[in-house]
Image: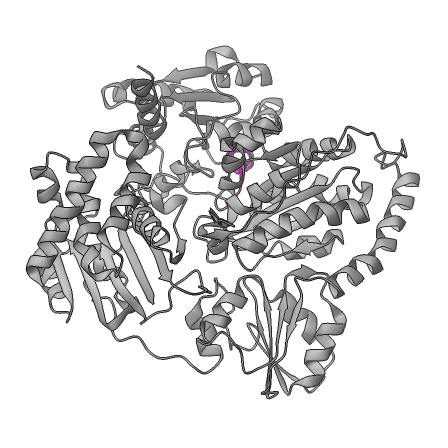
Amino acid sequence: MKKALLLGDEAIGQGAIDAGISGIYAYPGTPSTEIMEYVQRSPKAKANNVHARWSANEKTATEAALGMSYAGKRAIVCMKHVGLNVAADPFMNSAITGTNGGLVIAVADDPSMHSSQNEQDSRYYGKFAQIPVLEPSNQQEAYDMTRDAFELSEKYGVPVLLRVTTRLAHSRYGVELSEPLKPNDLHLPGDPKQFVLLPSIAKRRYKILLGVQEHIEEDSENSRYNKYIEGKDKSLGIITTGIAFNYLMENFPDGASPYPVLKIGQYPLPKDAVNKIFKETEELLVLEEGYPFVEEYLRGVIESGHKIHGRLDGTVPRDGELNPNIVAKALGKDLPPDYSPPEFLANRPPELCPGCGHRDLYDALNDVMKDYGPQRVFSDIGCYTLGALPPYNAINSCVDMGASITMAKGAADAGVHPSVAVIGDSTFTHSGITGLLDAVNDNTPVTVIILDNAAVAMTGGQPSAGEGRIEQICIGVGVEPEHVRTVIPLPKNHDEMVRVIKEEIEYDGVSVVIAQRECIQTLVARKKRMRKKK
Amino acid sequence: MKKDIILAGVGGQGILSVAAVIGLAALDYGLEIKQSEVHGMSQRGGAVVSHLRISDSTIHSDLIPEGTADMILSVEPLEALRYLNFLKKDGWIISNTKPFVNIPDYPPVEKILEEINSLPNSLTINADGIAKALKSPRSSNIVMVGAASPYLDIPVENIENGIRQIFGRKGETVVELNIAALHKGREFALGEK
C-alpha cells in the first residue's frame, strides 16, 4: 500500500478524519496549527461535512468540541501546550462530565521553546484530569493513536489527551492509512443529567471517573503502544516515552538495543511493565521529551537503592528537547563533532517583515514614549512581540494571551502613567476583550493599541475572529466612541499616529487606538490568489 | 544507502521547496525520507534549518545526529556555517555565495566564503547570478538543488520528477524554468569536480 507523506500534525488530522470525526475545533498555535489546516484542505473531510473552523480561543474550541461529543458525534480539539491553560476549565470538567461521542484533545508541546513562552509538559494535565494520555513516537503512531484515541474515549466515556512535541509535529514520514470509519449518528446522552455538574451530580460523576481508573490502567497495561523489548545486557534498563524512542534507536545502527527497553506510548503508566524492567535490570535510564514526568513518578520519595538516571540526576539536561546526541551522551556513546561553527558567526533572530505595519506603529509609539519615560508598554503574543528586540525595544511584557491590557490596567492602578497596552486583533478577540471590560468598568487610564492586521499572522495568516469588527467590539464593551481612534500604520502617516497616540494617552480614561493595515504576508498571498483567478 | 542533509537558509528563502524537491525525488527513486522543518516564529527573516534524511531502510530519528551529516546545503553563505557541527568529516558543504544581509553584524562575506572553502569537500556557487541569467531569479534555490545533485546518489530524472510534482500546478513554463535551473546548477557542480 502506498504511504502518505505526512507531518506528525497532518497524521493526526488524517487520523481524526479516518476516525469519522464530525468536527475539529482549534485556535492556531505553533506547533499545533497544521492539524486544523490539514483537515480544512482535506477533500475527504469536506465530503464527510466535517465542521472545521477556527475558534476564538482554546476554551471556546474545547467547549464546542464537548458539545459535539454531547450530541454523540466524534470531535477533536487542537492547541499548543499553553493553549491548554486557556482551555483548562472545560478540559478538567470534561473528565467529570465524561463524553458521549468520542472526544480527543490534541496538544502539541514545545520543549526548547522554539515558538513559545514556556515548555510545560501536557502529560501532567492528563494525570491531573485522570484521563488516558497517548504519546506517539512517530508519524505512523500519530495516525494510529488518533484513531484509537476515539475508541478509548467512547469505550471508557472519558476524553483522551493526545500529546505530541515540536519535532514530531513538524517532521514528515510515510504513513500507512487504514480503512476510514463512518461518522457517528446524532444521539443524545442516555442520562439527561450527565453534563449537569451541580454538586450533587458532580459528586456522582466524579465517582464514575474514579471508578474508570482501574480500567484505563488495565488498558495501558495491555496497550500495543507500551512495548517491552527484551535485551541481553541487564546492567541497564531504558524507559522511553514518545519520540525519545527514535533517538535511542538512532544510537543502535543495527536497530536493536542490547539493553531491555520499555517504550511508553500510553498513560497511565503500565505498572506491571515498569516493575518488570525495574526488577530485571540493575539501573534505569529514563528518556522522555519534556519534564521528568515518568522519572519523578519512578523515584517517588522513598529511597529504593535502585539507580535511576535521567533529567533529575544530570544524565540528561534538565530542560530543553532531546536529540540523538543527548541520548548518545546518556548512553556513554557520545563522540565530539569534527567541526564547529566559526566564532565570527552572527546570530540571525527573527524580525518583523519588511513593509509590515507593526514597524510603522512602533516607530510612532517610540516617538511618543520618549517624552514619558521608559518601561510603560505592555504587550502580548504575536508577531509584534518582536518589537521587544532591536531596533525597536518598544515593549516591556509578553506573558500570556490578552495579558497586555490587564497588566497595563494593574500597573495603572498602581500609579504607572501612562500605561499602554499593545495587542494584536486576534489576541484581542482571543482573551483581550474581557480585560478591556475590566478597564472600562474601572475607568482606568490606559491606552490600548490594537494592531489590527486582520489575521493570526505569526502562525501563517489564519482568519481573525473579529475581522472588521474591532472598533464595534470596543464601543460595545463600553469605550467612549470618541476615544476609539483608527490610524493607518504607514510611514507617511507617522506624524498623525504620533498625534493620535499622544492625545489618547493624555485622556484620563480608557482609550483605544486601532492601527489598521492588512498583514503584508496575507496581502501578498491574497493578491496571488486573485491573479490566479483572472 | 543513507544521505543525511542539513538544509539551511533564512526564513522566506524557500528551503522547504528545496527539501520537498529532493524528498520527492528520493521517494520517486524508491527510497524512504524523513524531514523535519521549522514553522512559527523563526520563519520571519530568522535562521531556518530543515533536516532531510534519505535512506533505503527505516529512519529512526527526525533529527540528524551531530557530526554525521553527509551534506550541508545552504541557500545563504552565513547560514551554511551555522550548522557545521552537524557535518561529518568528509561531508560536503554546498552553498550559495549570495549573502542575505538583514543583521547589523553580518561578517565580511569573503571571510565566510574562505571558511567554507577551507573545508575538505566544499562547493560555492553564485546561484542567484545563474538564476538571474535564466531570467528566473526565484529559481536560485533550485540551482542549489542542481549543485547538490551530483552528490545525492539520486538519478537526475527523479529530481526532475520532484520538480514537476512541486511546480506542476504553477504551469509548464515554471516547471521548465526550474528544470533548466536544476541543470545549470548541476553543470556548474560537475565542472568543479
Looking at the image, residue A250 lies above or below residue B77: below
Quadrant of the rendering where the N terminus of chain B is positioned: bottom left
Drawn side of residue B182 relative to residue B47, left or right: left
**In front of the other: A504 or A179:** A179
Q: Position of residue A74 (x, y in %)?
A: 70, 36
Identify the image quadrant of residue B55.
Answer: bottom left
Drawn side of residue A346 relative to residue B111, left or right: right
Looking at the image, residue A476 lies above or below residue B102: above
Quadrant of the rendering where the C terminus of chain B is positioned: bottom left
x 24%, y 24%: residue: A491
Type of colouring: one colour
**In front of the other: A62 or A212:** A212
**Which segment did they paint magenta?**
A400-410
Drawn side of residue B83 relative to residue A411, left or right: left
Is the stretch drawn in magenta largely helix, strand or loop?
helix
Looking at the image, residue B74 lies above or below residue A240: above
Residue A306 in view of the camera: yes
Q: Position of residue A174 (x, y in %)?
A: 47, 52
Q: Position of residue A253 (x, y in %)?
A: 43, 75
Drawn side of residue A319 relative to residue A103, left or right: left
**In front of the other: A80 or A313:** A80
Q: Residue furthest top?
A: A482
Q: Is residue A401 magenta?
A: yes
Residue A300 in view of the camera: no
x 8%, y 43%: residue: B129
